[in-house]
Image (cartoon, rainbow, N blue to C red):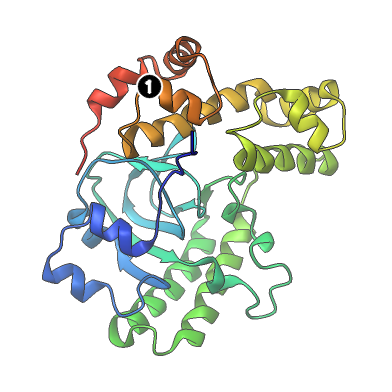
Amino acid sequence: MTQTNIKTHSTESFRQHFMQDIPMLHDMLKADFGKFFIVRVEDMIRLIKLPVPPTRSTTHTFIFLTEGEAIMTIGNDTYTIYKDECLLVPAGQVFSFTHLDINKGFLCNFQPEMVIGKIGLKEGLNDFDFLNVWGNPRISLKPSQALPVLQMLQRVFQLYTEQGLKQLELIQAYFITVLYELNQAYQPLSKSTQIQAVKLANQFKALLFQHIRSKHLVSDYASLLAITPNHLNKVVKQITDKSPTKWIDETLVLEAKVLLYQTQLSIGEIASEIGIHDSSYFSRLFKKYEKQTPTQFRKMIDKP
């Protein structure tokens, strides 16, 4: 059977699927909005067709709140942020949200190219852990850190609102400075000071993201990393508080959730797509983590 690729939305296709096609949206999103845009959170949320089920985007999304709260599921975890906090959804990461949150702030959506090779960046996205799928998507800012971030976002918003991307280099300069300010406040998911162990755990999560449909054993990833399965088990559990097996299971379920939403494949076909050839085992695994069967999950989906 030919593998069914999960649809990863561009900014344009996300707009078509999940946004109301009204004049206000056309005014907010300027020409070349697929490259970069910035809007007020309180304006954008009212135009989204909720709920947004598990999906992916080719672009990065960044939310900074000045009031209220925002709730979003990113990967396998659900995050709530408040005033002076940020959420970052890396390109390719699975995300979803269901509620009309009452809040204010800014939302930026940008292609990875916006921060690659610009303003002296040494390694592009590798300068910022939070733009990788294994990074911590939540950043809390102290008041002294939040103020310059807010001021720069206000300036970027002014430039974008008045001129779109006509002054792209100036927008890039301000926006990359915002990312560096966030980097100062960023706290990795692991507090461990064992740099090599953290690096290994992050490499495992990155490989998991790439190979989940074909590699389901701890030994598969240990082989890719040229270490023993026991060592991988020990390091990942120590750094993340979860075993590699649990990471693998949760990622399989996450992949299945997106396929359940995006396709009309049968449960057995979806199991096969993610490399599980026993549909009964797949259903048990799914229910273990979601507290409902794949069939029950599909029935709950409210497709636009």
Q: Residue 142: image x %, image y %?
A: 53, 55
Q: Which residue is drawn at 87% across and 32% down?
A: 227
Q: Residue at x 62, y 60 (%)?
A: 183
Q: Residue at x 16, y 58 (%)?
A: 20
The residue most toward the front is 1
Q: Name the residue under label 1.
A: 267
Q: Nearer the viewer, residue 248 or 82?
A: 248
241 displayed left or right of 62 = right
Q: Residue 98: image x %, image y %?
A: 27, 39
Q: What residue type is labelled 1?
A: Ile
Near mark 1 (Cα within 10 A), the count class, few <14, some 14-19 or many ≥20, is many
Q: Residue 217: image x %, image y %?
A: 70, 23
Q: Which of 186 and 130 is in front in this view?
A: 130
Q: What element carries label 1?
A: helix
On screen, 217 above or below 129? above
218 displayed left or right of 251 = right
Q: Residue at x 20, y 35 (%)?
A: 302
The image quarter in which residue 212 lies:
top right
